[in-house]
Amino acid sequence: MYNASDLRKGLKIQIDNDPYIIIEFQFSKPGKGQSLYRCKLKNMITDVIIDRTYRSGDTFQPAVLEERKMQYLYEQENEFCFMDVENYEQTFLNTDQVGEAKNFLTDNLEVEILFFEGKAIGITLPNFVDVAVTKADPWAKGDSVAGDTKPITVETGYVLRVPPFVEEGDRITIDTRTGEYVTRVKE
Amino acid sequence: MSPGLKNKSPSKDQGRLAARKRNLFVRARMIQSIRNFFIEKDYLEVETPQIIPAPPPEAHIEAVRTGNQFLHTSPEICMKQMLSAGYTKIFQISKCFREGERGNLHLPEFTLLEWYRIGIDYHYLMNDCEALISCIARDLGIEERLRYRDLDIDLEAPWQRISVRDAFFRYALMPLEKALNKGVFDELMVREIEPNLGVTKPTFLYDYPASLAAMARLKPESHEFAERFEFYIGGLELANGFSELTDTNEQRARFERDMQQRRMSGKQIYPIADRFLKSLEHMPEAAGIALGVDRLAMVFTNTLKIDHVVSFTPEEL
């Protein structure tokens, strides 16, 4: 259990049975008044941000979160299925929980799934993933200049801009944090 | 490379300390200016002990224990004993200690300027504040207008003055009595009121509810309020001053009330400061004030974090 004086940026606590992370923290104490612990907190399931002011004497349950290494298996009716690589247990995340990560989920990709009280609530991708290019216009040599890019589609359906020499059937590396092209993978 | 310097790149600690050089220079000049101001006005600079047996039992201030005594949370009770003994104008710049106070505006070990004078009340003290801050600004080469945060603050006297009651009405949109009854005085003060104080000119917030005054005199015409004020520059609370309570019996009753409150909320209990209470029998009318020197340095260096106006924070040792 935490006391108000333990509160700080980055601490994870439970409010109404949901896990929250403190994203901003300020200790305040008006002249001769009581200590106030002002927090901006983000709900780790819904991403909703709330403001709360706590006093000395307030207590908090820690939000215990666990990350597990899992493999992406398939998507079905807006549910994404993942399998624990150690015990083969399967778990599901919905489209909202997967968010932008769906653009980079290739079959069997190893990801970290975040659990709160046994329930999967979020996903962390590796920083770089390799994906196959499924649609690309051929490079018309001669009518392009250095720095040109063209749009392509990769196996997940994600569209991004890449240098003109990338062709259909190539594999490329994408930075999942920015969604941008990094390099072409040499086979 | 100059002779005598070691050929090593500076560590993170050294870099951080070096980056504070300008602020620490301003701070030192500011403290010099404070001394000159009071010495010129015939105040005696005094030093009272930092280790004391019985801190005043303020409801929300925690003293740090050392052996079977305490580090002082302010030099107040010793300085007032000096007034009772015939000292008329005294000031002190001292390190004070308060357990658990740490944030952008708080250090558990910090520097307070306190000054006391007999024969005056809190209104006179407000004039002193105006004169002191103008004097420091002049010595630091600041002409009338001060840049703090994104604000352009006019230091010229007279400053703004607003009563606590009016401030609740104007900024908190809740009558003071209701805020007290609902127990949200401090929350509203921090969230709604303080950010609006001292934005164009420094501002005095005065006449606090009697229940929020440990050692201030009540207003003779209305016992609901105490002759206590704070002043703010750019939303930052800098000082707490008041007309001193000189009635031994009433002071003892308040200490007992506050000690009872501390006991109920499970806080540490201090011995009663008997010598101080006895000395009040001889204490003349007086007023006194405590001003946060670190915070004043924040204002004059345009710094938002108290860490940047001290050489070391507790975490940096």
Image (cartoon, helix red, strand yellow):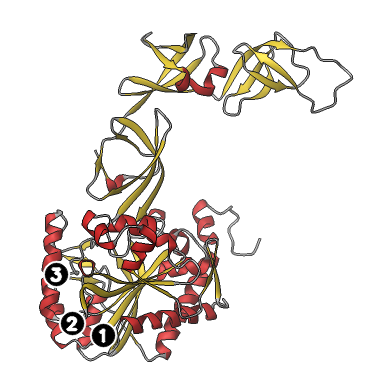
Tell me the crowding category of disc 1: few under 14, some 14 to 19, or many 20 or more residues within 10 angstroms, Cα based.
many
Q: Residue at x 21, y 65 (%)?
A: B58
In three-dimensional space, the C-alpha distance between marks 1 and 3, rounded to whole angstroms, equals 19 Å
* Crowd rating for badge 3 (residues with CA inside 10 Å; few <14, some 14–19, many 20+): many
Quarter of the image where one finds residue B49: bottom left
Determine which residue is flagged by label 3.
B255
**Residue A1 placed where, x, y %?**
24, 38
The one of B101 and B317 positioned closer to us in this rendering: B101
Please report, as a chain letter, where disc 3 is located. Answer: B
Q: Amino acid at mark 2?
A: Thr
Picture residue at 28% right of the left edge, 61% below the top: A33
- Amino acid bearing label 1: Ala
Q: Quadrant of the N terminus of chain B?
A: bottom right
Q: Chain of mark 2?
A: B
On screen, residue B267 above or below A83: below
The circle on residue B246 is 2
